Amino acid sequence: GGAKKAWEEAMEAAIRLGTAKSFSIGLEACARSRKWPKVRGLWERMGEEHKDTFAYTAMISAATRCGRWEKAIAVFEEMQAAKDVMVDEVAYNAAIFAFGVGKQPLRALEMLIRMQQHNLKMDRTSFNTVISACAKDPKHWSLALDCLNAMINDVGILPDIRTYNTLISAPSIPKDEVMRLWKEIDARGLKKDVFTYTAAFKADIPETEEDAIGIFRSIESPDTICVNALLDYLARRGQWESSLSLIEKISLSSASHSHIDKGG
């Protein structure tokens, strides 16, 4: 009994209507709920005549979302071999993301190069995904910086704050490079967000305890992860009193106002 879940309704509609669009919507709905057997079942049930560019891309994304990145790539390869199916920028971006999830930075980069070879438009999403995959790999962090340079100088796409958040939060990137990227954020006039500041605390960017506290006070809505990053930063410097004082302020604030008091 009870109301049907969204993915169940979408799945029933996909089967009932039997169109490429309805099947694709069903795939996305099941993937959001991480229902991999349902995703796979819908795909197997979909007739070849319904497997168009939109449907293939939906399946690539659905498989990745369900943690089946290798299946996502298999579907991408099937898409490339399919007759009269256009493999567009969105499909390539979905494949790049799948390789990123699978921690395959070199293959993600290969996809980016193939996009260029096929005269497909590479966008910020394409580069950000490859940069993220490379930055997270201790062996290939330098490729992330190479991608950033290519993005700016070769393709003419300006990085956004997400690009820089990814880079400065990567533990493998050397401190001098992180500091250069931090200054570049200001030089480009980008607005730092809570993720930027969290990454800054983790990367030991603030030079002093006072700098760190000052940065924290400037954050509009610090979350728990950001607070913990600041506490860890202070603890690494032996600033236990500052850490305890900050915890006390946060505890009092949570008890009385249900929000983080950044202190005065």
Image (cartoon, rainbow, N blue to C red):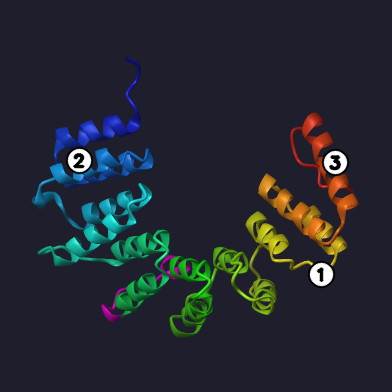
Secondary element under disc 2, as helix, strand or loop, is: helix
Whether residue 9 is visible: yes
Judge the density around disc 1: few (<14), some (14-19), many (≥20) Cα neighbours within 10 Å: few
Judge the density around disc 2: few (<14), some (14-19), many (≥20) Cα neighbours within 10 Å: few
- Tell me which segment is drawn in magenta: 117-128
Secondary element under disc 3, as helix, strand or loop, is: helix
Q: What residue sits right under mark 3 in the picture?
A: 249
Verify whether residue 118 appears in magenta: yes
Which residue appears at 17% of the width and 55% of the height?
52
Q: Position of residue 59 (x, y in %)?
A: 26, 51
Q: What residue sits right under mark 1 in the picture?
A: 207
Looking at the rendered structure, which numbered label has been put on residue 41?
A: 2
Position of 187 with respect to 153 (left or right) is: right
Looking at the rendered structure, which numbered label has been put on residue 243?
A: none
Can you tell which quarter of the image residue 82 is in? bottom left
Which residue appears at 60% of the width and 74% of the height?
173
Which badge, 2 or 1, is on the more N-terminal residue? Answer: 2
Q: Are marks 3 and 1 in contact (CB under 8 Å)?
A: no
Going by the numbered disc 2, the residue's amino acid type is Gly
Image quarter (top left, top right, bottom left or bottom right) of the N terminus: top left
Position of 104 with respect to 30 (left or right) is: right
Verify whether residue 195 appears in magenta: no
In the image shown, does 205 or 104 lie closer to the viewer?
A: 104
Which badge, 3 or 1, is on the more N-terminal residue? Answer: 1
